[in-house]
Image: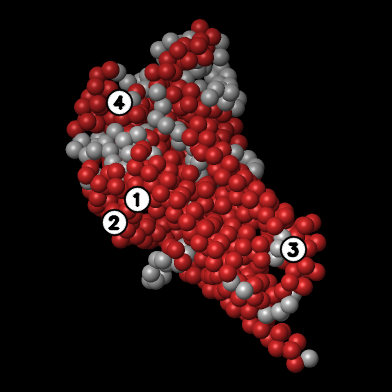
Amino acid sequence: MPSLSSLLSRALVLWLLLATFVPCALAGEVGPDPRQTWQLLDYVAVDYAGAIQGGKVVSPAEYAEMREFSVTIRSQLAALPSAPGQSALVAQSDRLIAAVGARADSKTVADLAHHLADGLLASYPIEAVPASPPNPARAAPLYAQQCAACHGPTGAGDGPAGASLNPPPIAFTDPDRAARRSPLALYEVISQGVPGTSMASFSALPDADRWALAFYVGSLAYSPQDRAQGESLWRNNPELHRRLPSIGALTHSTESDLAGILGQAQAKAITAYLRATPKAVAEPAPGLAAGPFALARERLADSVQAYAAGNPSQAKVWALSSYLDGVEPVEPMLAARDRALLREIETAMGQFRAQLGQGAPIRDLDATAKRITALFDRAESVLQDAHTDATTAFLGSFTILLREGLEALLVVIGMIAFLRKAERREVLPYVHAGWIGALLAGVLTWGAATYLVGISGASREVTEGLSALFAAVVLLGVGIWMHQKSLAGRWQQYLHAKMSAALTRRSAVFLFLLAFVAVYREVFETILFFIAMWSEQNSTAILGGLIAGSVALAAVAYWMLGISKRLPIGQFFSISSILIAVLAVVLVGKGIAALQEAGWVAQALVAVPRIEWLGVYPSWQSLLAQLGVAIAAIVGFFVNIRSKRVSERS
């Protein structure tokens, strides 16, 4: 049977492999950038009409550019990483080259380019979306400084430096061009530049400035009258809010696309208003107040829209964000008032993500989305009861700390009790350093999440999931090992002879690591939950719940340490081995569930109860993982008992 040090060594290797894999996975694929290919397709779709009219070349320079770009598009598509549909994209690019070479009409070429661009997004999603609604007004001085010399002070393409350029600068005031360009297309041009033209990349500008510039130049073709009409429509028509539910939808929209849905006049007015005032997208629809599930609704609508547009990868991203960033931060408050409703929301959103993965018909997906939206409405009604806001905040704060702290407490107290039974108190500082270090790391996480960067729901779930799996692997090995030693007898002699060197030299480091990982996993989630639920109005109640939860955890720790002191050492190890094995089963279920919520593991739903404190979730993947760990523990215990009997007979 391997020693504890050996088991911990193997677990550390696994953890290091996971730690190495995560940054690589999150960094994304390396290779040619599909953004530039998409940008070239958009450029060809819009500018080809300026090169060919009626089958004749009206601008030789622009026509040569169109031919060059169409060939470049094909070569870039062929060089992209392998993905489903790549061969079809290359074949479509051949048709685009042929159409440009044959001087086809501009509509044919634009349709081919747009269809190819949509296919490119489906296979290689471009997830460029502003972090917050841009402020086009702040871009006016930036435009005057960086762009007016070529494009002119009003965007008419008549700047003094542009007279000598070939091809000439784009006229942003051209209504036909403006109708066919999305803010995303303009952002990509500003960020990447256009090869073969005088348009250089402005990637050195902050991202927020590039988005502000994109919306600013995208609004120059519209009059103040257009914007005023659009504002009136937007403020009085809830249907328009459903058509453009989020900044992401607005970023990808064009006037031409909207005209097919809303009509030419409304599409022009709405585009004029929202490009000049993109923050209006975040406003509630007429008659509706912005509630705690506003972000969840927005991302859910984005998901349905992306799926309908033939982009299931992006739809999955939005669906995950709807739950992780829109629902999960509100979970503690809703659970304190109506836990059954919370479970109903989680189940429905799991079904929605499963439908995305199965390629369900859009009508089925839309029906599920409407059912989820109705659940959001019910949840907001529950949360809007002003009389119990303070009570809910207190209970939410208390239950968060107690729920997240108990698992970490079981691991740390178990290690402390073990070292005391083994009379190895000199190793206790490593354990204490582990959990104290985890608390300090939690404070740094709070600072980063509050002041430096936004930690997405997916990143949170990945961290929690991998940490839980690491802890489960370690605990499974330790549980089997402890069970074997509980059957061996002569504990004091064994511990002094076998554990002294190991605990002093190597295992102390692993005990530190296990304490750190077990506690930081819970601290990480707790910190982000408290950030999400914090409000000045209920700050006293939240702090009260935090203090009460801390006192409750301290009382549980005191009781557990007292019980462990009174147990005979053989019985302590026997009971501890069973509890540790059970905890490993719980953690592996939670780890798989967290990775499912982050989109790392597939989710096949099954009709079983959801029991969070046991790590039981209604999916085959998490249940089978738990079954596997339980079988491994049972087999390990059986082998231990059988080995003892063989040894006794010998």
Return the residue found at the far top. 160
Residue 338, disc: 2
Q: Quadrant of the C terminus?
A: bottom right
Crowd around label 3: few <14 · some 14–19 · many ≥20 (10 Å): many
Residue visible at 76% across and 65% down in the picture: 499
Whether residue 388 appears in this view of the structure is: yes
The residue indicated by pointer 1 is: 395
- Looking at marks 2 and 1 on the same chain, the residue that comes earlier in the sequence is marked by 2
- Between the residue at mark 4 and the residue at mark 1, the CA separation in whole angstroms equals 44 Å
Q: Quadrant of residue 75?
A: top right
SS label for mark 1: helix
Q: Would you say 519 lies left or right of 233 here?
A: right
Crowd around label 1: few <14 · some 14–19 · many ≥20 (10 Å): many
Q: Position of residue 406 (x, y in %)?
A: 49, 58
Q: Position of residue 561 (x, y in %)?
A: 56, 62
Residue visible at 38% across and 39% down in the picture: 534
Determine contact: label 4, label 1, CB under 8 Å: no
Q: Which amino acid type corresponds to the residue marked 3 in the rendered image?
A: Ser
Look at discs 4 and 1 and give the one toward the viewer. Answer: 1
